[in-house]
Amino acid sequence: DFHSKFPSEFGRFKAGDEVAYKRMSDDAISIGILKYFHTKSKRPSATLIDLVLGSFQTAFIEDLDLDITASKKRAIFQKIVNKNSKVLEKKMYLNFLML
């Protein structure tokens, strides 16, 4: 199994934790769910499911669990809601077409 090759815990973090973090790909602040850790490098990192993008992302351990303001957190969650509502609208529309 692929995931068994990677630790599911590192320091105070464990798989399944929801954290605010800085994406390695574009340095944007986002919220994600930790999946597993890459610990055998000079700068350990983690793979997460990004709740805004809906894709796997990577972040350095030092960029996990950021202390973000309440307004920033609300803005990120609003992006998540907007994205999910668009997906739901599309699914509902496709279901309507099949009637």
Image: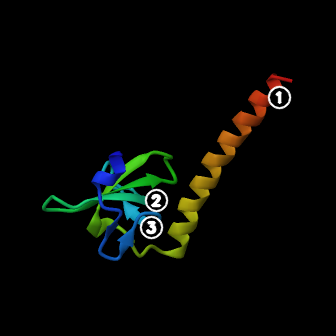
In the rendered image, is residue 30 in sight? no
Label of residue 32 in the image: 2
Point out residue 96 in the picture as x, y percentages from the top left corner.
83, 28
**Quarter of the view holding residue 36:** bottom left
Point out residue 76 in the picture as x, y percentages from the top left corner.
53, 60
Left or right, 66 with reference to 54: left
Residue highlighted by disc 3: 19
**Is label 1 in contact with label 2 (beta carbons under 8 Å)?**
no
In the rendered image, is residue 51 in sight? yes
Left or right, 24 with reference to 53: left
Q: Residues within 10 Å of mark 2 (few under 14, many from 20)?
A: many
Could you say whether the residue bearing mark 2 is in a helix, strand or loop?
Answer: strand
- Quick one: label 1 or label 2, which is nearer the N terminus? 2
Q: CA distance from mark 3 to mark 1?
A: 37 Å
**Is label 3 in contact with label 2 (beta carbons under 8 Å)?**
yes
- Quick one: label 3 or label 2, which is nearer the N terminus? 3
The amino acid sitting under disc 1 is Phe
Q: Quadrant of the C terminus?
A: top right
Q: CA distance from mark 3 to mark 2?
A: 6 Å
Q: Residue at x 72, y 35 (%)?
A: 91
Q: Residue at x 65, y 40 (%)?
A: 87
